[in-house]
Image (spheres, coloured by chain):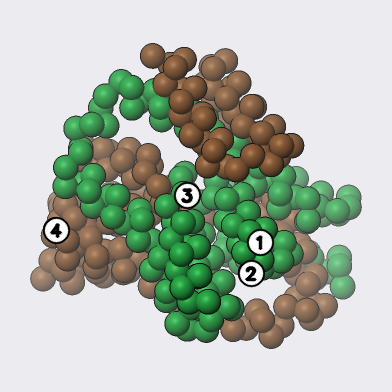
Chain colours: A green, B brown
Amino acid sequence: MLWELFLEFLKLGALTFGGGYAMIPLIERHVVKECGWLTRQDFADLVAIAEMTPGSLIVKSSAFVGKKMCGLAGSVVATIAAILPSFLVILVIAATFLRVLGLPLVQSVFRGIDAAIVALIVAAVVSVGKTTVSDKRTLLIAAGTAIVVLIFNVHPVLALLAAGVIGIVLFR
Amino acid sequence: MILWDLFVTFFEIGLFTFGGGYAMIPLIQTAIVDGFGWLTMKEFVDLVAIAEMTPGPFALNSATFVGYMVAGLAGSVLATTALVIPSYVVMLAVQAVYSRVKERPLVRAAFKGVKAAVVGLILVAALSVGRASVVDWGTGLIALAVIVAIVRFKVHPVLALVAAGIVGALIFR
């Protein structure tokens, strides 16, 4: 199990571009569908928890899933595996390839990737939304949060806390 | 001692950055460019670009990069570790509590509300990132195609990204 954790999170760490929400579809596919370490519900819970705690989703996922599957050792192994690939890539880049990134071809490639990253985030909305927005009330909470954060600049954590309280009131 | 400053700086950043790596940018700038003067503004901007284009979360990549620029290999290991520790420890604690209370009705109710709100937040992220990346017909088409591919046809996200990169190389010359 420890070895599996290491391998799977190493793979995940190598494949997560764009950070944050763009990673949700990828992590979900890996952790829920391919490895079966969390249910879809659990994963949506994890995303919610991740919103309210500091740090990157990949680290939180590895700590959470690693701990669940294999205790403390699991969390350490999974987390190290998750950050190792990008750590090494950055080291190599910092040490050598800094000049490559100005090349027009590389710029074009990343323009395409940036557009795709938007799509991944939208996919995250859909996937979390599917298990979460099931009636008018949850839809209202989702829409309300988007409006309140986007237009009125309410701090996201505040909005989440309020939603939690509303949840307790509405869904008991 | 520079290594200690590096550790403390990124530990604090790791402790206080909610909502994703990009929120870190002003914090890092204040500490590293304005505060310690470890990087110039130009170097910092380059760093942001690089950290964004490489695999892994922006926050982690920045820590690794800045750590390396400031103090070589030791710096990169230290900064990255410092960034990860707060979030890691918090998650361990959360997992322990969560596994015991997750089925309680009150907890389920609160989660139901929070999760719905999260959907709203992710939508906001899509809109903000969209405003910056989807700027013309080409990028718009790519975004649309990838959404359909992933949501409807269950294409592996990484495959979609690679394809988008290739298409980008072809049409944005």
Query: How many angstroms separate mark 2 from mark 4 (CA)?
Result: 37 Å
Disc 3 residue type (three-letter): Thr
Same subunit: marks 3 and 2 = yes
Task: Please report whichever mark, 2 or 1, sits nearer to the chain's N-terminal start.
Answer: 1
Q: Earlier in the sequence, mark 1 or mark 3?
A: 3
> What is the chain identity of the residue bearing mark 2?
A
User: Label 2: which residue?
Assistant: A37
Read off the chain for label 4: B
Image depth: mark 2 or mark 4 in front:
2
Percent from the top left, x then y, of residue A35? 62, 64
Q: Is residue B53 left or right of residue A150?
A: left
Q: Are marks 4 and 1 on the same chain?
A: no
* Callout 3: chain: A
Residue A78 appears at what percent x and percent y?
A: 46, 70
Measuring 69% from the left and 41% from the top, which residue is drawn there?
B154
Q: Nearer the viewer, residue B113 or A169?
A: B113
Q: Quadrant of residue B2?
A: bottom left
* Mark linked to residue B72: 4
User: Are circles 2 and 1 on residues that touch, CB within 8 Å?
Assistant: yes
State which mark lies toward you, 4 or 3.
Answer: 3
Residue closer to the observer: A72 or B88: A72
Q: Position of residue A12 (x, y in %)?
A: 49, 56
Tell which of A37 and B20 is nearer to you. A37
Q: CA distance from mark 4 to mark 1?
A: 38 Å
Circle 1: residue type: Val
Q: Relative to B61, is A131 on the left or the right?
A: right
User: Which residue is disc 3 drawn over?
Assistant: A16
* Disc 3 from disc 2: Cα separation: 19 Å
Q: Are marks 2 and 1 on the same chain?
A: yes
Residue that carries the numbered disc 1 in the rendered image: A32
- Decide: few, some or many residues near mark 2? Use Cα within 10 Å; few <14, some 14-19, many ≥20: some
- In the structure shown, which secondary structural element does the residue marked by tag 1 occupy? helix
